[in-house]
Amino acid sequence: MAGFFRECRDGVEVFVRLTPRAAKDAVEGLETTADGRSHLAARVRAVPEKGEANAALERLLAASLGIPKKSVSVVAGGTSRLKTVRIVGHPGDLAPGLALLAGRKA
């Protein structure tokens, strides 16, 4: 399961490829870029202006994992499609939910 997230001091950092202006908000599993890196693919209806798409991504991940929105924040790639999202919590507790989002069994 390694590859699309890593443990950090206070939780995990998840690598996400975000597509704004989508028809619906959804997490679509894993995808691999040409350079071999894995990302969680996500789509949001919000536009990429004034941080709206980033905020929508934070809400989507929080709702998908059943955690408070304040536990999720975009920490890198604010203006890029490829983002790093920090999720605060115990990595062992977060891993099963992340595995489900990625389309894998924990």
Image: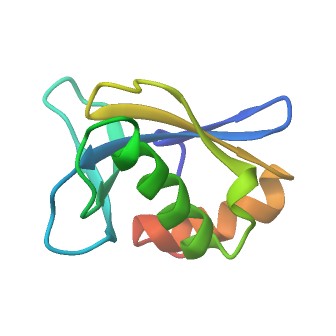
In the picture, residue 54 is in which quadrant?
top left
Left or right of 92? Residue 19 is: left
Residue found at x 48% / y 49% = 55
- Specify whether residue 106 is in view: no
In the picture, residue 7 is in which quadrant?
top right
Left or right of 93? Residue 100 is: left
Residue found at x 68% / y 60% = 69
Residue found at x 81% / y 64% = 93
Q: Toward the viewer: 94 or 67?
A: 67
Q: Position of residue 98 (x, y in %)?
A: 57, 62
Q: Toward the viewer: 12 or 54?
A: 54
Q: Position of residue 103 (x, y in %)?
A: 40, 72
Number of marks present in the image shown: 0
Q: Position of residue 52 (x, y in %)?
A: 38, 47
Left or right of 61? Residue 9 is: right
Q: Toward the viewer: 36 or 91?
A: 91
- Specify whether residue 96 is in view: yes
